[in-house]
Image (cartoon, rainbow, N blue to C red):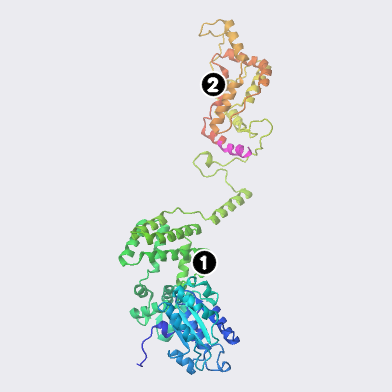
Amino acid sequence: MDDQRYLVTARKYRPSLFKEVVAQEHVTETLKNAIRLERLAHAYLFSGPRGVGKTTAARILAKAINCETPKEEREDEAEPCCECDSCESFEAGRSLNVFEMDAASNNKVDDIRELREKVRIPPQGEQKKVYILDEVHMLSKQAFNALLKTLEEPPAHALFIFATTEPHKVLPTILSRCQRFDFRRIPVPKIVDRLREVCEVEGVEADEESLMLLARKGNGALRDALSAFDQALSLCGSTLTYGELTQALGVVDQDLYFRLTDHIATRDTAGMLELVRHVVRSGYDLQEVLVGLAEHLRNLLVAHSLGGDALEEVAASTQSRYTEEAERFAEADLLRLLTLASDAEEDLKQSAQPRLTLETTLLKMAQLRRSADLREVLQKIDRLEQMAEDGELPSTLPGDGTAEGQASSSTHVDAPSGDEPAGFAEADPEEPLRAEADSAPEGEPSAGATQSPGDTAGSSEKAAEDGTSSTPEEETPTAAPADRSGDPPPDPEGRDQDEMEEDARDDDSGDTSGDAQDASVEYGDLFGTPALEADDPSEEESENDTDGQTSASVRSNPGGSADAQAATVAEPPASSEEGETLIAQWPQVVQAV
């Protein structure tokens, strides 16, 4: 074994060229062009998350600027040769022209004043002196102000590179004097590719799921992913398996999230609470469990909308599983579940009982009412419309015998016009009832035989012409039979014949339309229709002459045939079949109105 000390993977495989920097091409290409064109600024600001290559890019820039090999002799004129004395001394940490300072620990005014004194000294045989200030946002306000004049008018041989993870804390006067480059988080597939290269060099065997887990553990930072890789090697050795890796890193197995969503889909609260108990016994951080559940629901939502292939951060073997699981939920339900998980993350941070918060959140997810898929509903409506156009709809719809369960009849109904009652329009629901009344046995009243006020007036006129009673025998089943002896029946109150005739004439001269009106009101109340309007008084006066003929039937029927007639009109259908016929016709009347 040589005398080299052990280096962690992140330092051992640290990029030394611009082309080795992962997923920051927008920065490296700009810097390389500036070197080629010799248009370098006097100050740069590299900002971005931790572990994405800010300090590494600053070191490569400093090395490329001071490389002693002529540009035409290099493989890439913008890249350092890594073979000259300047490059080798820089790699060994012996370079006198590159200064790196940690601003977090050297953040006082005196530190910046000392730095200003060094800036005045020209470089020794090289092109520029490069000053790299890491975590520059940690400088005090006084230190920033002390640096302003030097940044505004720096010596020609000086170049400053500031690196920070919090650029908003840097004074605007400093920002305005720098060229700013924003570094981005590294995508999971790019981290997986880099880890695979390291595994090949180190002779480590790792499956796709293990590399994906390490890359997700890095959270966009390659340095963090390489640190997790070192930790996994310490436990698993030269062979990395997904099961052992979850134990080494303390990560919840992805299968647990699939089981959770399975319990949510089946509303299995008992199984869900059992999983929570398993999580608590295993010692997992409940905050990380909830964050992992939110990420899992997000993957389901993406798989539902775009398919499993869109999940670049998931192994290929798991993408199909996400696709199958996403089919069990509607898109709206997944969005509501994801909202619950996101809200619970904040509640869990402030909760004194995190387990209770997690359990209640999962129970809410299980009891959440499912939303109907709008696409499926629209497809069903389209099928029903197509069936209606083709005439394939059944005559009756499934139901329990109520009005909602009956299909509307195919009889055409025109909208009401003129002074006709709006409640009935021109539907003429009595048309099938008359047919049933005609088919009823002789001597028995038809349960569906009803009369409207117009029919009552018509029957009175016909009775006046024929000289007979306007009330058919089958319409007055409760009336007493007439006396066949020719003598009028005796009055129960002891009145003579003249008094009885006078009372009958008084009854005939009254408003006989009231009984029919009452009957129409009862008929309307029975079927939920508007009541018929009262007849015009002028029409009643013109009909008083014909009503005298009706009084003959009243005199022949002391029980009051007019009341019996009104009762007959108001009487609801006795037969269930006739009632269903009326109910089936009624939606047409309502639709016409």
Residue ID at (52%, 69%): 310
Does the magenta stretch mainly form a helix, a strand or a loop?
helix
Identify the amino acid type marked 2.
Pro
State which mark lies toward you, 1 or 2: 1
Residue 433 left/right relative to 300? right
On the image, the x and y values in percent for residue 144 come to 48, 75
Q: Could you say which quadrant of the image residue 360 lies in?
A: bottom left
Q: Is residue 159 above or below residue 343?
A: below
- The disc at residue 477 is 2
Magenta includes 591? yes
Q: Is residue 256 above or below residue 436?
A: below
On the image, the x and y values in percent for residue 432 come to 60, 33
Local SS, label 1: loop
Residue 21 left/right relative to 244? right
Q: Pick whichever of labels 1 and 2 is earlier in the sequence.
A: 1
Q: Calculate the distance from the C-alpha at mark 1 to the C-alpha at mark 2.
A: 74 Å
Given residues 588 and 575, the one toward you in this image is 588
Q: Give the residues drawn in magenta, as a range.
A: 583-593
On the image, the x and y values in percent for residue 502 come to 60, 8
Local SS, label 2: loop
- Tell me, yes or no, whether the two marked residues, 1 and 2, touch with CB atoms within 8 Å: no
Given residues 133 and 346, the one toward you in this image is 133
Q: Is residue 346 above or below residue 502?
A: below
Residue ID at (66%, 37%): 415
Given residues 437 and 63, the one toward you in this image is 63
Residue at numbered disc 1: 307
Given residues 163 and 295, the one toward you in this image is 163
On the image, the x and y values in percent for residue 168 come to 49, 70
